[in-house]
Image (cartoon, helix red, strand yellow):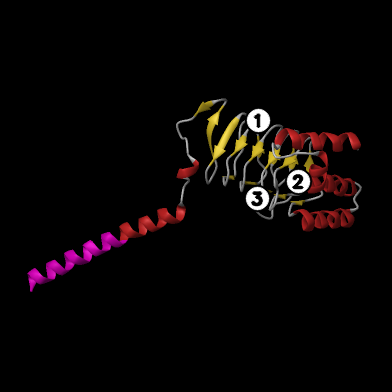
Amino acid sequence: MFKRMKEDINTVFDQDPAARSVVEVVLTYSGLHAVWAHRIAHMFFKRKMFFIARLISQINRFFTGIEIHPGAKIGRRFFIDHGMGVVIGETCEIGDDVTVYQGVTLGGTGKEKGKRHPTIKDHALIATGAKVLGNITIGEYSKVGAGSVVLKDVPPNSTVVGIPGRVVIQDGVRLKRDLNHSDLPDPIADRCSAMEKEIERLQSEIAAMKRERSHSG
């Protein structure tokens, strides 16, 4: 157990340049506290002591702002940076050396049964505010951009951005359907633009009808 805890602390130093001392990391890093508490909760969950597992999970959520279902399977050297608002579902599976930032949701898409949460493979990175939903897989060494909503599998060594998420880089090659963070789709703006065009069309038809009436009169 202490070997794993030391490994977790070293992971913080590897991932976060702001980490200054072991005492600071152990006492002030909520992501680290959340991972440690989850291991205890998961231990009870595997022994079918579900109430105790959920109780630990809820206490963990109260103190850290990070909600990890005790049934989630998490690998080694999992790093949650800042962490506030992170949600990880029951059937989520996370590999080794995965990094997750604040506001990330690894959740489901409805009331489906069985495996309903994502599988995150080794060395993946999920950036701030990203939502990865459903029984999908994020491949090894892949990155999900900030604010993205991913609903489909992501191949290994890929970068995904946008709503819905699209692969823009794969195996180091930038794809033609690239989508920058500054140019994310805006369905509300698109709908408003379509309504404006429809109003302009109706106004033109009304004006034409008025002209026809004036000529006939």
Mark 1 vs mark 2, foreground winner is: 2
Q: In which quarter of the image is the N terminus?
A: top right
Give the position of the C terminus as an image quadrant.
Answer: bottom left
Task: Identify whether 35 is placed above or below 121.
Answer: below
What residue does disc 1 label? 141
Front-lying residue, 184 or 9: 9
Q: Residue 93, located in which quarter of the rendered image?
A: top right
Q: What stretch is highlighted in magenta?
A: 199-217
Q: Name the residue under label 3.
A: 103
Instruction: Report whether 168 appears left or right of 134.
Output: left
Q: How crowded is mark 3: few (under 14 residues within 10 Å), some or many (20 or more)?
A: many
Q: Residue at 12%, 67% (x, y): give it.
A: 212
- The spot of residue 214 in percent (x, y) is 10, 71
Q: What residue type is labelled 1?
A: Tyr
Alpha carbon separation for disc pair 2 and 3: 12 Å
In terms of depth relative to the viewer, which is nearer, 53 or 8? Answer: 8
Q: Note whether 128 is above or below 214 in the view shown.
A: above
Q: Is mark 2 on a helix, strand or loop?
A: helix
